[in-house]
Image (spheres, rainbow, N blue to C red):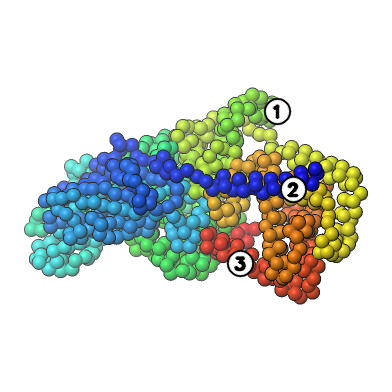
Amino acid sequence: MRGVSFKLLWITIPAICCFMILGGVLQADGWANSYFQRPREELELTESIRKQYGESRTIINLNGAWQTRREEGDSWTQVIVPGSYDFEGIVEFRRTFHLDSTFVGRAVYLVAYGINNRCTIFINDEFLGGHLGGHTSFSLEIERDKLKIGGRNEIRILVDNTLLPRNSLPLKHRSGLGYNYGGIFRDIFIMAAPPVHLVDLQVMRIFEAQLDRCQLKVNASIRNKQGAAQPEDKLNLHYEIWDSTGQVQIAKSDNVPLSSNRESFQQEVHFGISSVTLWTPENPVLYELRACLTQDDRIVDQNNLNIGFHNFEISENRFELNGHPYEIKGLDWYEDFANLGPTAGRKTIEKEILRMKELGANCLRVVGTPPHPFLLDICDKLGLLVFEEMPLILVPESRFQDPKFAELASNYFEEMLQRDARHASLVAWGLGRDLETQKPETRRFLRSIRTKVAKQTNQLTYLVARNFVDRLTQTSTDFHVLEMHHMKPEEISGLGELAGVNREGLPSVISYGAPLIVNDGENSSLNLMDEGGSKSLLNIPRSIAIEELQAHTLQMALKSIRSQRSTDGVLIHAFSDWRGARPKILFGQHRNPYLNRYGLMNVGREKRRAFELVQAVFANKKAPQITVRIADSQNPVVYPIYGIALILFFLYNFNRSRRLRGNLRRIFKFPHGFYTEIRENRKIPLGHTVFLSFVVSSVIAVVISSLMFKFRENLVFDEFLNLILVSDNLKLQLSKIIWEPLLFILSCVIVLYLFFILLVVLLRATSFMLGQRLPVSQFMTLTFWVAANFVWLLPVVPIYYRIIDRPDWTVPAIWLLILFVTWSAVRLFRSIKVIFVLNIFKTMFLVAILLVIILGGIGWYYDSRSALFDYLPMYWTLL
């Protein structure tokens, strides 16, 4: 009966594992139910777009109803564009539009403000073009022979938001960025221009020393579809500056004759302007720049741009705006809204900026990707400095050595620069986060980007550092942004010296945020202390308590940041909660681990307690009283209870069975004889093997769980897991169970059983190739008894978490685990030598072949899926 029970156990464990794997793999399609779309009342193109292009252009709005399908052969489903889907893959979109006779003889363009990440576009089933890079805008000219004037035209767009490990932007490994939504998630329209028209305007402002006069350098790109047929002495270009009302002309350039013999050309014009009111966030005065293309004194095309005049620079190692010192009081922001994702329209974005102004912020850092053009228009109008960033996150030098990737990144930045450099609110470009600036190819790429900036604008550049703070170099950019939201407030002190900022003489801005990491689903109260630490506050609702803790953490951090002389500003991370690229262990207790809960407001834009605190700090007013200060530290009782129970279970069976004691004594004192008996097919009681397998698996599981629980809030650890766990579903489940030690231990035991079974299969296959016929049961016995050395960790198991939780003991505790794993590997090597009757050299050769096959296969898989070997040197440096 006992044998039957044990055999049933061996069948049940693998079956449970298989069901768990299948449960994680099977998913319902239903993708259209996860499609986010802009509200219908915000689908109309804004007046600013129509005003920019003037009366000479005709615009057809393509926002609205489109048909979509995921695969060819699927039925078409109607959705609203702009919209986005929340999975990675290819989706096809189509719709029709009508062109009347007014489009005859005109240049027709398709303009898209954002299609993520790659797209291929067809007009009337003929290939039009494609685009790489989801958050930059682009336009494609539609040749006349592809269009049906006076008839119905069909546009079809294949969208693929799959990110690649080596050749996409952003790269697949992109910790700290927002979720990778796919789709046509920003405005899209058809625009018809005159045969001779302005394509693009680049504006550079150069101030004199006293800021009382500004020289404008405007570079116009012009397209001439009529070619040499146009008399070249009749085409002229001039610029006008008007006040914000459009009633008073402030300045005008000379008429510049244009040569129209070429189809595309550029013309640079310089002219001066004086006595303008300087733009500041507190007084955002705008002027209107009109670019007029004339023929015989008749305007044939006109572009209108809102511009502001200011001088944001670094002087004497500090920020200055219009000649005065300026402290950055800013916010980190992600373009992500509840039930909208990244598809928000102008009204929604304007409400967002007004909330930031209410908070007292003067600067906005758009993290990791260029924003919707609407945001910059609104920041120009309402007064908010903007830092705009490229999506270069933890990019290894090997990527910049690849000409294909370097070109992709360079073109991406050129599109950013071309679209946004003219804006008064945009004062700095972020070139990436945690780049290897000490490596030559990385430095060469950064220099090339800075050269592009210097040619077109006088805006600043910066690098962001979280993990590689000590590797920032002065020659890379103008200033640094230091991300410190993975640190405790007391760890910030002295950070400027660590970064070498004072040695380099570069300004630095610190980005800091405090996460909310307690489960909202629990209604229990927290046992916290009042501000003096003298009185216990019981029965405080959890939702209120965690907001108080967040506010308190921010308050302490802001005091520390402002006390540092090397710091020139602060960015609160973040204005609102945002959906991350991957599930994050830090938020595993929450029902949605994708949601990064750092915000002063939640994802639904409801204010938290920290909003009032930051509002007071930015206004230099007395901060509101924060009631809750100190939370009880979390010390799981599962580990000592489970560990003690495991020790008692082991001792009970050890003392109860003399044969078990004998087998354990032989496996350590006479391992060669033990392995020989297995080779000779002498049976070890199945009960002893089952008992030992459970004890060994439990010991390893408790140790791994303790390590995971220890580093659950460590962002570097989380980033490294993103490399190893390529499946979002697997990372999602892991993020949740790490916070539940007992569930993690039991899950880990099951996974370890699977590992041992795979090892048995490998040994049995090797035996078959070597012509041996040892039963599978003997290999099962061998595998578990080889790992018996982990039994010696039993006394440490109940206190292992306490050991690694002490900073001085963390590294020795990890080395202890490495020692036991190495010991077990040596024992396995010796057992293979005995079982297969090989000498040491043949054993080494056999093990080497097996390792090459296994590790080579694993390495190939991870290198192809996540470019693991590109990142390993970076993470080794961090360790």
Compared across the picture, whether 779 is left or right of 89 comes to right
Compared across the picture, whether 812 is left or right of 727 comes to right
N-terminal-most mark, 3 or 2:
2
- In this view, the residue in front, 869 or 216, is 869
The three-letter amino acid code for the residue at tag 1 is: Ser
Secondary structure beneath dot 2 equals helix
The structure residue drawn at horizontal position 60% and vertical position 30%, both measured from the top left corner, is 522
N-terminal-most mark, 2 or 1:
2
Instruction: Identify the residue under disc 2.
Output: 7
Residue 640 tag number: none
Residue 856 tag number: 3
- In this view, the residue in front, 803 or 461, is 803
Compared across the picture, whether 42 is left or right of 196 comes to right
Look at the numbered discs 2 and 1 and tell me whether their residues touch, using CB distance below 8 Å.
Answer: no
The structure residue drawn at horizontal position 28% and vertical position 42%, both measured from the top left corner, is 64
Mark 3 neighbour class, 10 Å CA radius: few under 14, some 14 to 19, many 20 or more: few
The three-letter amino acid code for the residue at tag 3 is: Gly
Instruction: Identify the residue under disc 1.
Output: 534
Front tag of 2 and 1: 2
Instruction: Kindly tell me whether residue 497 is visible in this rendering.
Output: no
